[in-house]
Image (tube, grey):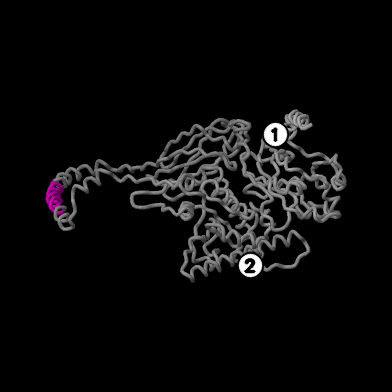
Amino acid sequence: MWGILYLLLTLAQPLWCQTTAAPVTAQDCSLDCIQKGDPACEYCRITRSHITKGLGFNSIEAFGSCIPWPCFELLGDEDPKICQHYVQAPNDVKVEFLNEPNPESDSIVVSWKPSYYGIAFLRGFQVFLQALGGTSVACQLFLFHRNISLPASHAQRVYKSDPFPGLSLGSQYAVTVMALPVPEKWEKFYHSEIFSTRSCAEKKGFEQCKNDWYPEHIEVQQEGTAITVTFNLAPPNLGIRSYFSLCYANGMKKYTNITPDLTTNKTHHSYQLNNLQEGANYTCEIAANEVDAVRKVFNVRVTHIQNEDASPRSAAPSLAVILPLCLVAVAILGACLAILSRRRPELQMKKFNMQPDIISQHEEGGDQEEVVSLHRNRLKPPRLLICYSSYDGPTHIKAVMQLGVFIQQHMATQVCLDLWDSLRVAEEGSMAWHCRQIRECDFVLVICSRGFNRRPEPEDDNEDLEVGLKSNTYSSGVVIQLIGEEVGRAKARGQDLSKYMAAIFEYSEETDIPTELRLISHYMLTNDLPLLFSHLHGVALHRPGAYLKIDHISDKGFAKVPAGAALQWAIYEAGMALGEKKQRSLEEGD
């Protein structure tokens, strides 16, 4: 009998392996079928209409674009214990790209495996997709029927989400897969992965992408004090109608907006750079006037212009008389200086006990500086918490998020931002989340703006959205007070204050830094990006005979990468929006 059973198991093993290896996709079934435990609806996708029917109100108005997981409302009426079990986070989360018919976007599908721990009480999954540097969120909810109890062998099954279409090309996203149910005070119920969508050039080719196209042929000519630059225009199919040029020299910037007349020439265009400093070497960039467009770098040297003498003939006799006398005087003076120069160094070297052979070796060595690279033996990157005021509007929040993206991508730092950890913030509460991050992070950077000078108290309001915004604004003010207390306490104890930093963007002022944060280091961004990097990694930018060289963090180099260009544009938009807001408030005050 045992031999027959072993034979049956051996024959059934290939079929079992094939079954477990096949990905499990969700079914279209009703919520009633799930609640009744019908075996026909083993694994189902839940839509907003199901939530609306089960809860009795529109979930979009209450929860936004996400589909909530109201376990007690949907499945816990008859058996409340069904929503109280701990389930470990899924594992082996993968992102797979699909053949998106729309050439302007990407489409993905997410796959994962459930954990062994708590799998008998697993009731479903919820998948979140959030754009880094943005607020857009997409959600999908999948449930098993309520009577199911999965065995441990089902932990090898691969579950797949529905497609997430319409993702922006060349962008970063965070996908989070959460195991359901989720009891309170449980930290291991979800797994997150960060991925990047394909670039436009990878999907459509270089000639079909606005952001990836750049002028290949640039010719520079000088005519007096004016510089004429000629470059090739983008192909007509890209629809690029305007360009821009940005030149740097001696701490000065010159921005030129370029709008070619396509009726006269469709292949090339010439523009002038006026009022440039004579004798200066300019580093210039030219690109299409598109967000994150690739920039072409070229150099411009403005030569000195010598003024011709108006009357050379009248000056000739005087020069003939004066020139011989000058030569005689120079010869006598040179002989005297030669005698003194030979004697004086010997006396000085004798006085200070200096060795001339060492000096000659130093002079032969030249003034070459050593390039110091960043130490790569650090076990993990430093963690940086970024705090900000939500009172200054969405453009300021976008600038903060773009700063976080740039720091995480190009400054070897792990950034903690509440907008990127919405699940934990919702679970712990804004204040508890910030307190924990302040304790655990290596550094805290406060982005100061006008909003910190206005500390509104929370007011009663019937509309949920307005209450949420007011509570966020109030909590940001409380967080600043908390950080100020930590700084004051550390200062009173004589402790190191390097953990805390303050910064302002170019559109803010020094007075926007609260009084309690004046004791810590503060920076102006983006000019002080190298100083911020030096602070985060504890390295000196300059030392005798050496300097620190890190790509993409200099005042000129940060905008050459897409994240830096997006940060520059976000700061510009925020400055314009806040300027208009200030102007309106002044007009209303008048």
Q: Is residue 502 above or below residue 566?
A: below
For residue 579, the mark is none
> Residue 463 at what x, y percent from top left?
77, 61
Q: Is residue 314 above or below residue 82?
A: above
Quadrant of residue 18 in the image?
Answer: top right
- 338 falls in the magenta region: yes
146 vs 197, nearest the viewer = 146
Tell me which residue sits at (73%, 62%) in the image.
Answer: 467
> Residue 17 at what x, y percent from top left?
72, 32
Residue span colored magenta? 328-344
Q: Nearer the viewer, mark 2 or mark 1?
A: 1
Q: Is residue 204 above or below residue 74?
A: above
Quadrant of residue 213 in the image?
Answer: top right
Q: Which residue is mark 2?
A: 455
The reply, left or right, for residue 441 in relation to residue 84 is left
- 44 falls in the magenta region: no
The reply, left or right, for residue 243 in relation to residue 428 is left
The reply, left or right, for residue 343 in relation to residue 191 is left
Res 334 seen here:
yes
Circle nearer the N terminus (2, 1): 1
371 vs 6, nearest the viewer = 6
> Residue 241 at what x, y percent from top left?
60, 38
Q: Which residue is mark 1?
A: 100
> For the residues marked 2 and 1, what is the alpha-carbon distance in whole angstroms?
47 Å
Tell me which residue sits at (40%, 43%) in the image.
Answer: 281
Kindly identify the amino acid type of the residue bearing the numbered disc 1: Glu
The reply, left or right, for residue 8 in relation to residue 450 is right
